[in-house]
Amino acid sequence: MTDIIKLHYPIQNDVEPMQQVVAMGFFDGVHQGHQSVIRHAKREAEKRHVPLAVLTYDPHPIVAFKMLTQPLRYLTPLDQKIELMSVLGVDRVYVMRFTSALANLSAQQFVDEILMHLNPVAVVAGFDHLYGPAHTNSDMTHLQGYAGKRFEAITVPKCSLDDQKIGSSRIRKLLDDGDVDEAAKQLARIHTTTGMIVHGEARGRELGFPTANIQTPEQEWLPGIGIYAVKIEIAGQWFIGMASIGRNVTFGDNRPVTVEINILNFHNEVYGEAVKVAWYHRLRGEVKFNNAEELIEQLIKDQTATQQYFETLEE
């Protein structure tokens, strides 16, 4: 069981924890690069016979530096991020509230007033991690100098795939482009979102392809508009489906974006159920058809393509 400890600067914590290895970073996505950092830190903790802690932040640091023009979205909202870290063997997660006061700390202040409260024997982070204002020597090459002899600073090198750095920004772009297959390689898992099944327009039922309409939390990062082969978890059981993220352009212009999933061989009423959606493969983009008959013809092809995709995957 991973302990979760929320922190706010200045830290009002008079009782220091036992010595521990601390991995630090925002870790949105907990992708292959992040996993490399955490696994490296886990090995250090086991070698030194101490627990492994992660220092992360909430909300995203961008809130302290920019006016937001759209809602904050995450590859892995905090609860999912902690869940993934727990699987990687993290004993304790410190969630530091990211505020202007924290952002304005110098690198030396961050070490003295934040890290030292965590009683680290070693601090581990990725090669490009910053812990103070940009352009102020707050990178990993200077951390040992700020630490002195109080803890060891350990830098984990870049993690690459196909000669490109694995990073959260690239994964967000891949998802926006609908390339969930490549995003899965970067994440080392299938990208998932959550939601609740709500009533829609029932147009899919009229077409012979009833859909579960998914109300997705605003903070979660949905893939771009398109048709996808997915799996959906309802009440602990996974089902295969074909999902549409789009505006249903065949039935009018300027419609809102919706998430609708036709669950194959499923006929139960499940309104109000909390679900998880795993985005496996993009089948095609959204198309404006001339009439409902053309749309139905395409949906039959999409259904076959979805079945074939998962049959091939299982093989």
Image (cartoon, rainbow, N blue to C red):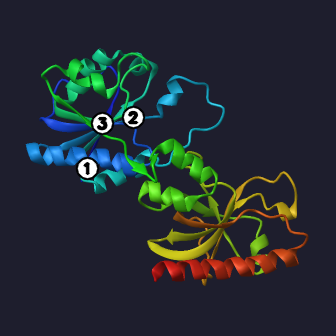
Can residue 279 be seen from the camera position used here? yes
- For the residue pair 205 and 90, the one nearer the viewer reads as 90
User: In the rendered structure, which amino acid carries the disc numbered 2?
Assistant: Tyr
Q: Position of residue 16 (x, y in %)?
A: 15, 29
Task: Residue at 13% x, 23% y: name it.
Answer: 150
Visible residue check, residue 207:
no
Q: Tell me the crowding category of disc 1: few under 14, some 14 to 19, or many 20 or more residues within 10 angstroms, Cα based.
A: some
Quadrant into which the N terminus falls: bottom left
12 shown above or below 52: above
Q: Residues within 10 Å of mark 3 (few under 14, many from 20)?
A: many
Q: Which residue is mark 1?
A: 39
Mark 3 = which residue? 125
Q: Residue 233, relative to residue 137: is it above or below? A: below
**Residue 228, image x and y in percent?**
63, 67
At a point 82% along the width and 74% down the height, the residue shown is 295
User: For the view shown, which residue lies furthest in the front direction?
Assistant: 163
Q: In the visual, does 219 lie left or right of 14?
A: right
SS for callout 2: strand
* Residue 71 image-quadrant placement: top right
Q: Residue at x 26, y 19 (%)?
A: 113
Does label 2 or label 3 sit earlier along the sequence? 2
Marks 1 and 2, Cα distance to the nearest angstrom? 19 Å
Q: Amino acid at mark 3?
A: Ala
Disc 1 marks a residue whose amino acid type is Arg
Query: Mark 2, mark 3: which one is toward the viewer?
Result: 3
Q: Which residue is mark 2?
A: 57
